[in-house]
Image (tube, rainbow, N blue to C red):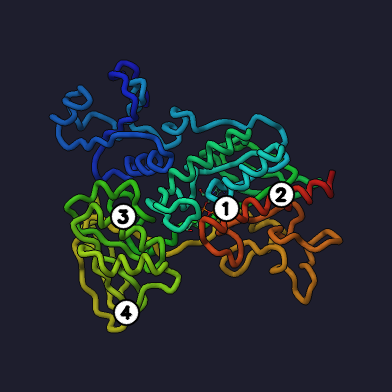
Amino acid sequence: MHDPSQAATATTRVRLFGNRDSAEAWEIRDFLKRSVVEFDWVELVSDEDCRRELGLQDLQNVRLPVVQLPGGERLYGPSLRDVAGRLGFVAKPKLKEYDLSIYGAGPAGLSAAVYAASEGLRTVLIERSAVGGQAGTTSMIENYMGFPEGINGADLAERARQQAVKFGVELLMMQEGTKSEFHDDRIWTDLADGGQMVARANICATGVEWRRLNLANEDRLLGRGVYYGAGASEAPLCGGEDVVVVGGGNSAGQAVMHLAAHARSVTMLVRDKGLAASMSQYLSERILSEPNVSVRFDAEITGLEGDGALRRIEVTTRSTRQAAWIETPRLFVAIGGVPNTDWAADTPIVRDEGGYLVTGPDLLVDGRPPPVWTRERLPYYLETAVPGSFAAGDVRHRSIKRVATAAGEGAMAVAFVHRYLDETA
Ligand SMILES: Cc1cc2nc3c(=O)[nH]c(=O)nc-3n(C[C@H](O)[C@H](O)[C@H](O)COP(=O)(O)OP(=O)(O)OC[C@H]3O[C@@H](n4cnc5c(N)ncnc54)[C@H](O)[C@@H]3O)c2cc1C
């Protein structure tokens, strides 16, 4: 993967070379963008590009994508984990046991980490991808208090990451909790790399994941014209293109506005007959008045086609069931999410029918906690059915799904962690 003989001149930025429709290149681009790593994307189309950019003769014989690190060293066909590792994002746990383990470094997890570490808890924050969660994919958050001009989601997350690290949080990125057990007043979590994490309390802040269209060809075209979310890393590459966004909520609306600044036209496909009641009014007003944006209501996607990359999508009018194909090289899917809670399936933790974690008063039936609850007292507001195991942010049953509420719940969960740790000391 790494060939030192091909080291190039040192640069201050990462350089990423590859094919336009490469899913691997897109995955790396997306990670770098969300991690606020400065990089140049260089598209290679011909042998001439290959000679000029890489000093290599024949594009066909180069393992793409190629990542050139700031020192000039090149990685050929690396995995995302390789790239993250070489940029210093991957680490092993330093301690055998922590006071608090936090899963998920979106706004809820980052906020919990800042408060926990600043209040002296031995805290580890585990994130399976880039920091920032959904907020990190957002080009502009305009309704977060304190930023009257709005703030880019990845920048907000990076500030929080720096703050958490400053207070001594151990951040383990590209690492995932897969299964948990609760005994001896500890949570024992298996990590995806085979390791185990032990902590006296935990906060689950694993948020939600994009809902899929569940159409034929979807997996094959992912990263090759089909993308989930706001397309923060892809928008600058959409110059002169006619692109499509599917979804009617805030996240779809933000994607539309961000893409409209780059693409020739943006078509927004909305299932309902109007923009979602949950969409902020300022956003729906802008969408409806943007000259290169058109909104099609009562519409759903029923087909995806393309060989190496997306070529066209089938759109069906829901009320008449009439279908027609639209040519487009890029489709951005923002149709809501499902919670990341599979890990809780074999635990006493209570989930609702959608898979969200039920906490505090929502656990009570006729004023009584569920039979699995083991304490005399009632569960704290953000506590799950397992004492010492808390949930914050979008992953929680009936959560508000906003950056501010996720950050607020993260901070609040830490206050309950202190109470719980005092009980078990
Ligand atoms: C495009 C878009 C635009 C938005 N715009 C706004 C806005 O303008 N204003 C606003 O207030 N809100 C906005 N939101 C909503 C807001 O971003 C979310 O409510 C907020 O990010 C929720 O934070 P969270 O920390 O609960 O979860 P998430 O942000 O979903 O973060 C969860 C994190 O957990 C990680 N994770 C999942 N499973 C595991 C595991 N097993 N182990 C380790 N890590 C794991 C994920 O990788 C992710 O990083 C927007 C959302 C989107 C998608």
The disc, 3 or 4, on the residue closer to the chain's N-terminal end is 3
For the residues labelled 1 and 4, say whether their Cβ atoms are less than 8 Å apart: no
Count neighbours of disc 1 (C-alpha within 10 A) and say few if under 14, some if 14 to 19, many if 20 or more: many
The disc, 1 or 4, on the residue closer to the chain's N-terminal end is 4
The disc label shown at residue 407, or none = 1
* SS category of the residue bearing label 4: loop
For the residues labelled 2 and 4, say whether their Cβ atoms are less than 8 Å apart: no
Quadrant in which residue 54 is drawn: top left
Q: Which amino acid type is marked by label 4?
A: Arg
Q: Which residue is mark 2?
A: 181
Q: Which residue is mark 4?
A: 318
Vertically, is 193 above or below 9?
A: below
Mark 1 vs mark 4, foreground winner is: 1
Q: Which amino acid type is marked by label 3?
A: His
* SS category of the residue bearing label 1: helix
Vertically, is 14 above or below 421?
A: above
Q: Which amino acid type is marked by label 2?
A: Glu
